Amino acid sequence: FQLPKGVKDVVDQAKTSSTEQGTSSTTATDTTPRDRHISASIPITPAELPHFASMSIMMFLFIYVFTTVRDTKDTLVVSNCGAEAIPFLKLYGVMPCATAFIVLYSKLSNALGKQALFYVTLLPFFVFYGVFAFVLFPNRDVIHFPLAESAAAAASGGGGGALMAATNLMRYWSFSLFFIVSELWASAGVPLLFWQCANDVTPMAQAKRFYPLFAVTGNLAPIVSGKVMSKVISFQKTKDDIGFGSTLKKLAVIKALVGLGIIFIYRNVYAMAEERDRKERTEQSLSTIRGIEKTGKVQITMKFEKPKQKLTLKESMKELMQSKELKAMATMVFCYNVCVELTEVLWKSILRRQYPSKSLYMEYMANFSQTVGTVAFLLQLIAPGILNVFGWKGTAMIPPVTMGVLAIAFFAAIIAGEDKIPLAQALLIGTVQNVANKVTKYSLFDPCKEMAYIPLGPDAKTKGKAAVDVLGARLGRSMGSASQQLLVFLVGGASGSIVNCTPYIGACYVTAIAMWSKAVGTLGKLFVTPEVKVDNTPKLESIGQAITIIKRIEDAKSEKRKNGNGKKQAKK
């Protein structure tokens, strides 16, 4: 078979270029081992380093913004409305907004491409933080509703109960709005925008090595955020709201620069992914041409796919919720957020008693963030080893077990009372427990959860992920908030203090931990490859049949030889 002249010219040209490329790649392989890992603790090749570094820095920037706005929102709401106001705000403010966010995000995902959807989701957050710092907070006395004298006295004294705290949320509506937007960022920043980008540009082979290490750089963000926030607070000329307003402006400018950095890295990461895909397609084409030149045959495979109709949000959720994997992941996210909510509000209530001033409260939160970042960074260094030793299921069980043990100690310290355990010691135990909440999530919970998304389909990675990470998280927080509200009204006493509900909160916490552990066990079974038992019976039967046939042939030959010898003797 001879190739036509035009095709033969293309093959010869491709052969020459492929030979040159192969020679150069061979030389490169001999001189620089680009396929070797940098070290045993860093399983990354030099060729993969730009992609890994870019994604790690992007995660750092996302977590930096998250840490900054988290400390700010708590300072604004707890200092003005009380910790008892947080459950009301999360249930009646954050939850409806999170639901609307999911509906809008789903509609935009059908109308926009991936990159346009990323920008449309990202930019409004940074615009709001700038408007709040430079417009809303400086005019807070004008835009806020007047505060009654009785409410002011209750707020300054840390009392007033849950109903007064909920009323203050309406009065300080701009602070409540800042809290809601920051809670949405907590669900839409790292869980949705970052991990969706990571899942889109990171192959499965790299994800197993990269994902536990992404957060190594990312977990430095709380340390840097705490240091920056403490430094900015130290520049305040006064400790009143005017000095606090100047701090907000400086932090808003820093957040704007971080947002520009996220956009730049995002564009660069997708450019690298497109270049990698182009090289892979070129190599596949060259391999095909070599096969044509070697065999002289052209094999063409044509695949026709029917255009897939885009589903509505309701149809997508109905289809996705039939997945056992997504149900288990939703349960994990839901229970984690319930547990965080049940301990966090109680801890912040005690924290406000110790640090009633905005500046002191914010400074304590800055130190808290630095501690979280330091511990998370150290834990992240050994996270790949933990995954290798304990596997997915064992690693995913570490967060609920650790959080549960520390939470029981925290509840016991509060129930014992200030006579036996001082409030400062109870605050310390609660701080350690909340550090464990954040650290285990960043270092172990998130990587395990994201690894479970990779084998799923594209709809599960976009709409399913948005439903699990955003709506599941909000439902968990709202369930924890609703439980605390009900307990405050039933057993909170005349003061309506959340501290009086500690025993009942502990019972709810243990229930959530049990559900979480059960979901981990279910998902662990689904993602463990079953041991395939090879049935050799058909092979043995075939071998037996072959032996029988061979034996019959040998018997026939022997019989034929005997008959031939008998005829010869008869002739003689």
Image (cartoon, grey):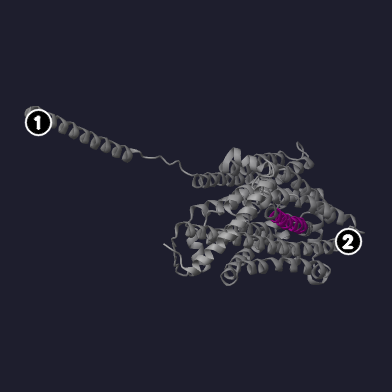
Q: Which of 63 and 56 is in front in this view?
A: 56
**Please, what secondary structure does the residue beneath circle 2 have?**
helix
Query: Percent x, y for residue 502?
Result: 67, 45
The residue range painted magenta reads: 53-74
Q: Does the magenta stretch include residue 73?
A: yes
The quarter of the picture where residue 20 lies is bottom right
- The extreme front residue here reads 572
Left or right of 509, for residue 417:
right
**Please, what secondary structure does the residue beneath circle 1 have?**
helix
Q: Distance between the residues labelled 1 and 2?
A: 124 Å
Q: Residue 308 carries which label?
A: none
Q: Which of 22 and 443 is in front in this view?
A: 22
Query: Which residue position is annotated with label 2?
Result: 243
Note whether residue 212 is visible: yes
Q: Which amino acid does label 1 sit on?
A: Lys
Magenta region's main secondary structure?
A: helix
Query: Percent x, y for residue 26?
Result: 63, 50
For label 1, the crowd category at 10 Å Cα-Cα, with few meaning under 14, some 14 to 19 and many 20 or more, is few
Note whether residue 471 is visible: no
User: Residue at horizontal 75%, vertical 48%?
Assistant: 373
Q: What residue type is labelled 2?
A: Gly
Query: Which residue position is annotated with label 1?
Result: 567
What is the quadrant of the C terminus in the image? top left
